[in-house]
Structures are given as structure tokens and as C-alpha cells.
Amino acid sequence: MKFIMRRLILLTLLILNTPFVEAQELKETPIPFRNQKGYQFLKKNGKPAFKAAFHNAEIFEGSLAIVQKDQSQRFLWGAINQKGKIVIPFEYQYINRTENYLYATTKSSTVIHDLEGNVLTKIETPYHNPREKYGFDYGQIYYNKYADPADHSSYKEVKPLNEEETIFQLKAEEQLYLYFQQNRKKIALPEAAVAIWTTNKHNTAIFRIQNKDYKLALINAEGELLTDFIYDDISSGNSADHLILGIKEDGKDIFNAKGEFLRQIPPSRNSWDYYNSYTDSEFIFTYQKDSVPHFELCNHQGAVLIPGQPGTIKYFRKKDDEDEDHLYLVFDQEKQHVQLFDVAGKQIFDISQLKTLTISFDHQAYFTNQEGKFGQFTLGKGDTTFLPFKELYCLFNQKAIFQDDEKNLWMENVAKPAIPLNIQRLRVINEQFAEGSMGKERVIIDQNGTILHRGHQRYDLLDNKALALRGEDQYWLIDSLGYKSSTPFAITKYLTHSGKGYYLYIDDRKAGMMNSNTMEVIFPSDLGYRSVQPIQKANSLWIVATKRGQKDHLYKGNELISENFYYTRDECDFILGKVYDREPKKSSAVTKDGAFLDIQYQEATSLGDWIMFRYSSGWGDSTNTKKYSLWHPDDQEHFYFSEAPVLLPNGLIKAIRGKSSFYFHPKGKALFEYEKL
């Protein structure tokens, strides 16, 4: 009994451990490598994963790799798993892989497999290699990642109708179909239809179809004709996808997004028509009549909300993120008056005889009437208030700046009357600062009208973060919170690196760098450089410093790396340029640790954590010309190749040397030892 129990326990352990052993074996995906035997699949250590060799081979995608083998002097395709076992037999002229299926083709048929190699169906029509994204050789049969293996039909033409590639036009013999990939629904279109399109990119419920006489009609997603073939053109016009416009000889028909007829617009030789719909509830029809702009507002059920009248109309939302509560503002240029309407076409108020009209950020409207009176109203409320000013001077950080008859400036104040600024010629710098003048002095004010500084000669806006002011012998800095400090330097630039801020400054025409928070000098100007250029890297701050008549000096922090450097650009963790204190004078990549790679490269590009160098001219023997190299900072070694390495869809880097392929991990590990390859 004990012996039997021990055998059962041992058998149980073997069963439990078997999947783990297989998982360990399959964790390392074999990679095809070409040698004298053909293509073999190798492990990372360079040893064969299994003995079989193939005439051609693709890399493993999922559990299968597509391979080619000599079968009685016929090179046929099949598929193997990661143990080398044949899953799809070598019987096919080619096998094409898509996102969901494998299509194995002979001269007379196509066998569709799933990605595990299981047979789904067989079609008595040969599959053709794709020449385009959406179709195959003249479309004898169409199957891509959206294909349905249960559909055995052959189509002469297959065309996607939307950007997402979920709706298609299928053509089999003389019959046209509308095909929806999401629910696999296929609808036969009327016999007269020879082509179909969407009405706009967002509407998947209504389509336009064309007959052989090039006339158009509307059809819904169920295949029901909504109109006859009477239109010369059907489009969404300028309707923001809420309307459909059918154009014909005797006028224009307007439909809503559901294909319901709204109204007809008769033709007019003396007018131009423009349709716009900002929401799914109303649309605007604007036109010219006797050279005067007119408009009409209708809802999407066809009812007229505002009958045709002269003027221009604008749409406004009461809240920036909502469409439900909106208004329409009408301005009649001839009569010089403004009307405000709600979504039902109800007039809220009417202000006549306007001379000017300006709408601010928060939907405040400012106007001047023909009598010269200046006023204000709020969109949505219709309240009108006359203000004791001549005009609106400018808008500063969502606040209005007014000017009175004496050309004095006043700042809008919600809680109290407007604030006098006692400033002339105000100019907005950004949302935080504006510059004006008080007599002969220049002044800086904030968004509250507070004077932050006066007496400067010029200013520099530093990355929209702060103002650097310059006087005759003094310098000041004002940050985004309005804090002002004197500085002995003329600050010229602001930059951030790894979350820290820095200022570039000039002291007696000599450049330096300082911490923006502590104002501590971290790269002194007394080194005598005329300019400094920071290079922001993830782990360190590099500086290219220049003196007149000398080559660039390269620093890593305060550590001098080279005194004869010519900086060109940076790539990943590398600084690229030429080093003149080395012989011969070579282009060089400086690593993140400050080491030089002295190589005469022409171009450097990053591939994962590797950097690929391309050389101006290759060198080597007649069978292997070295034109490219891969280099990684951890290995400190170049791998040379005759063709440019490429990043494969599976994430590996593939490179060619002679007739051999090499593979590298994008994180910096060579998958095989270089000598063994």
C-alpha cells in the first residue's frame, strides 16, 4: 500500500511539474538563423533549438513560425511550433498571416487556419498576395483581419467605407453589398446601385449610393432606399456632421442625420448658400439677397425658428464645456443693431443702432451705439448696462481694460467700480504681465492692475514663466507670482531639466548659469565664455560653452570633457559632434558617462537603447562591406553590418552582414554571442 502511495505521489508531482517545464522551455523563443544547411532556429546561446533546417523561415509570431521546405524539388510552405513540430503541413504555395487568421494557398484553393494552426474552413478559390492595404490582386477574393471565415463568397471588389475599417463595400459579380464587420451583417443593395459611400465620417446610419447614370440616392443601414436617384451630389456640406445636403437641378434638399427630410431650398442665381449646424438640434442657413447677407435658423425637425432676415448670426455656448444651453447672436450691419435669441428662436433682447461690438472671453459683450454711448451686456441674460467710458481698449487675462474720453485707462472690477490704472499705452505681454508707461517711465503691472516695477528700459519674457528686466546699470527678475528680486546679472533665458529650473545670464558679456529657485550660480561666468548652451539629459546636465575664436568646450556639469569639441546635436544618451583634439579629427559620440567613441560616422540614429551609426563610405572585403554599426554603452563594442539594422514588429532589431541575419534585443542584449554568429 505504501509502495502504491509513493508511486501515486511521484506520478502526481510529474503531472504538476510538466506544464512548468514546458513553460520554461517555451519561454525562450527560437530565432531563425541562416547557415550552410539553410535556416535553423537557434536559442540565445547559439545552439540549435531543434535539428530541422528549412529553405526559408520567418520569426515566431505567437506559437507558430511560417517556414518553407524542399518537397521533391518543390519549395512549399507550412508552419511549425516552438518545438519544431509540424502544425501546418508543407503543401502550400504560400501562407499569409493576418491579425486573426493564417491563409494557406494552393493553385486551386485556400485553407483558412486560426493562429494555432487549426483548420477553420476551405474555400475553392485561390488566395492572392496583397498588393494594397485593402485588396488583393484584382480582388478575386478578399480576406483581411476583418474577414469572416464562414463567408465563402468571392468578391470582385472590396472597399472600406470608414477610417476605422469596420464598414465595407463588397461587390460579387453584379451584386453590391454593404458589410458591417462588428456584427457580421451583410446587406444586399438595390440592383441599380454601382457604388456606395458614407455621407460623412461619423454617420454610419445613412449612406449615399450611385447608379450607372451617376445619380445619387440616400439609403439607410438596413438597405432601405430613402430617396430616388435624383441628386447630382450628396454631402454633409458645412454641417459638422449634423446635416445631409442633396443637390439637384431644381434646388437643394436638407436631411437630418437620421435621413429625415427637413426642407427644400429653391435655386437662386444671385445667392450663395451656406449650411452650418453646431449642435444636433438646430441648423443655420445663410445666403445673399441683393448683396446683403441673410440667415434663417431651423431645427432638425424642419421647423423654422427664426425666419429669413438680413444679418449675420453667431453661435455661443453659455458654458465652455456644454452644448445644451446655447444662444444665437444676430448682428444686422445695415441697421446696426444686435438681437439675442435662445434655442427656440425666442428673442431675448434687441439693441439698436450699434457702431461697434466686441465679445470677451467670458461671453461679455461690449458695444458702442450711434450716439457714442458705451455699454455692456451678458450673453444669456440680455441685461444692458451703459458704462462711463469711451470704448473697450483691450482684454487682459479675461478682464476688460476701458478708455475714457481723456484717454485714461481703467481695469474692470467685478465687486467694485473700475480701477483707474493711471497708465498710458498699455500692451499685454502674457496672461500675467502687461507693460505701459507713466510719463517717461516704463511700468509692469499684473492682472490685478498692481504695479510690479517701474523704471526699466527693456524686458525679456523667459519661457512664459518670468520677466527679466534691464535698466542702465541694474537688472531685475519678476516671477509668475509677482515676486521681484534684484540680480547683478542680465538674465537671458529660462529652462527646466529633471524638474529643476535654471536661468542663463550674462555678466559683463560673459555667460553663466544659475539655479532659478536659489539664484545660486552653478556655472560661473568668470570662466570667460561668450555663450553657454545647456543640453538636457535624463541623468545629467551637459553644457556646451563657447569662447570667441575657439572651439566649443564640452562640460558634464562642471566637469570639462573636451576643449576642442564641435557640437552638432544630441541623440538619446549621446552627445554628437566632432572632436578636434584627437587625431585624426573624427566625428564622435560622447556617451552618458563622458567617454568618446572616435568613429567617422555620417549619421547616428537610436534603435531602442542602441545607437546605429551610418558611415560616409564602407570598408571591408568584396563580400562584406561595413556601412553600419550598432553600439550599446553597456557592451562598449561595435557590431558592424553591410545593411541598415531595422526594428522588427516583434521588438527585435535585425541586421544583415553578408548573407547572415543577426538579432538584438532593443534593451541592449545581443541574442547570440557575436563570434558564434
Image: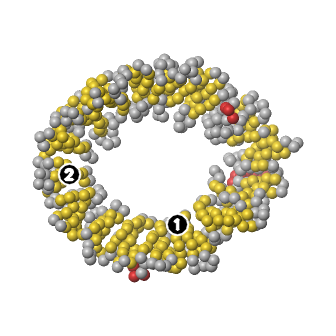
* Vertical side of 583 occupied by 445: above or below: above
In this view of the protein, which residue sits in the foreground, 269 or 238? 269
Q: Residue 314, how many percent across, how many down?
A: 29, 36
The front one of 45 and 445 is: 445
**Pointer 1 residue:** 569
Residue visible at 26% across and 75% down? 472
Which of the numbered marks, if any, corresponds to residue 393? 2
Number of numbered discs overlaid on the protein picture: 2
Instruction: Tell me what residue is drawn at x 62 percent, y 67 percent.
Output: 601
Q: Amino acid at mark 1?
A: Arg
Most extreme residue toward the right, as rendered?
A: 72
Looking at the image, which residue is at 69% across and 41% down? 97
With 513 as the anchor, is 427 left or right in this view?
left
Disc 1 to disc 2, C-alpha distance: 46 Å
Q: Secondary structure at mark 2?
A: strand
Q: Position of residue 568 (x, y in %)?
A: 53, 68
Could you say whether the residue bearing mark 1 is in a helix, strand or loop? strand
Query: Residue 342 appears at what percent x and percent y?
Result: 26, 32
Q: Does 442 sit left or right of 124 as displayed? A: left
Please state if 198 lies on the left or on the right of 158 as rendered: left
Provide residue 162's location: percent of width, then percent of height. Answer: 53, 34
Say what amino acid the circle numbered 2 marks: Tyr
Of residues 596 and 546, the one nearer the viewer is 546
Classify 10 Å Cα crowding around label 1: few (below 14), some (14-19), many (20 and above).
few
